[in-house]
Amino acid sequence: MFPGADITEVAASRCAEPSPSSGSGHRIDIENVTLEFAIARGARALLVLRDVSCRIEPGCFTCIIGPSGCGKSTLLSVIAGYLAPSTGCVKIDDRKVSGPLSDRMMVFQQSTLFPWYTAAENVAFGLTLRARRRNYPMAELRRRVSELISLVGLDGFGDRYPHELSGGMRQRIEIARALAVNPEVLLMDEPLGALDALTRMLMQREILKIWQQTGKTIVFVTHDIGEAVIMADQVLVMSKRPATIREVIKIDIPRERSRENPEVVRISHRIADLLNATF
Ligand SMILES: Nc1ncnc2c1ncn2[C@@H]1O[C@H](COP(=O)(O)OP(=O)(O)OP(=O)(O)O)[C@@H](O)[C@H]1O
Ligand SMILES: [Mg+2]
């Protein structure tokens, strides 16, 4: 049984939407975003983002790279609508972000799966929650969950609990769960940071495959320059805090990209130089 699923009520505003392969992604406009955290009464506010502006085209794979603590996660949270900027705004397809919405989903580095639910139940969670008020066939919900599990390459593992899965498999389930509500924008905050090098390379390929199949707009934070250059259409290189965008590097090398490709090496050096210059 899927979580919270009363079979007669289950359903799916979003289940009724097109399959995950039909999206075309939304455009993201980050317009002069400045964000300060109020710390404690009397203390000076902490300026984290300073006048950050950037356009991310629909379906674009964008990586964000920058020194630790510069404000990358904060910027993702502003795009997600979890944090409101002090000044400036983020627009998704010309609509101003004023809070979280299911058109944007976040995947984190650490697992946020419910340990008491199976992989399939975790994937179904968002669907069943939002689907309660409408009649929707349980079979359709199951079909969609199994389609998502297949998309992330985990056929046959739907009935396993998170503790029975490897770190890489858990991340795949996180991605499937985020995709379940058919968001147009996927925000990924170092989703591969906790994985070993081999699994990480495999997952990079998997994520690119999913991106190519779904057409989502992806914003992906990483500390790994090679990962950014292998994966992205564009890399936003951030300065140290208060973060600004030092440079937007467009990458049009055909995929699948090899780390030895001279152009990949050249761009990687360019990013390393920019990052070194920020310290
Ligand atoms: N809720 C908060 N309240 C106050 N300060 C915060 C809050 N969240 C983050 N910060 C501060 O904002 C700054 C940027 O944090 P953020 O997590 O965005 O950095 P980051 O670039 O993602 O770092 P990392 O690469 O280590 O993940 C840090 O100095 C952090 O201490
Ligand atoms: Mg972070």
Image (cartoon, rainbow, N blue to C red):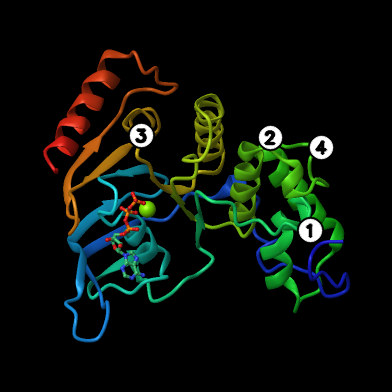
At label 2, which amino acid type do we have? Gly
Mark 3, residues whose alpha carbon is within 10 Å: few (<14), some, or many (≥20)? some
Question: Residue shown at 27%/81% (left/top)?
Answer: 40
* 247 displayed left or right of 77: left
Mark 1 and mark 4 in contact? Answer it, CB < 8 Å: no
**Label 1 element class:** helix
Return the disc, 2 or 3, that comes first in the chain's sequence.
2
256 over 132 or under it: above or below: above
**Residue hosting label 2:** 153
* 7 displayed left or right of 3: right
Label number found at residue 224: 3
Residue 199, image quadrant: top right
**Residue hosting label 1:** 141
Mark 3 and mark 4 in contact? Answer it, CB < 8 Å: no
Q: How many numbered discs, if any?
A: 4
Q: CA distance from mark 2 to mark 3?
A: 24 Å
Question: Residue shown at 42%/23% (left/top)?
Answer: 255
223 over 273 or under it: above or below: below
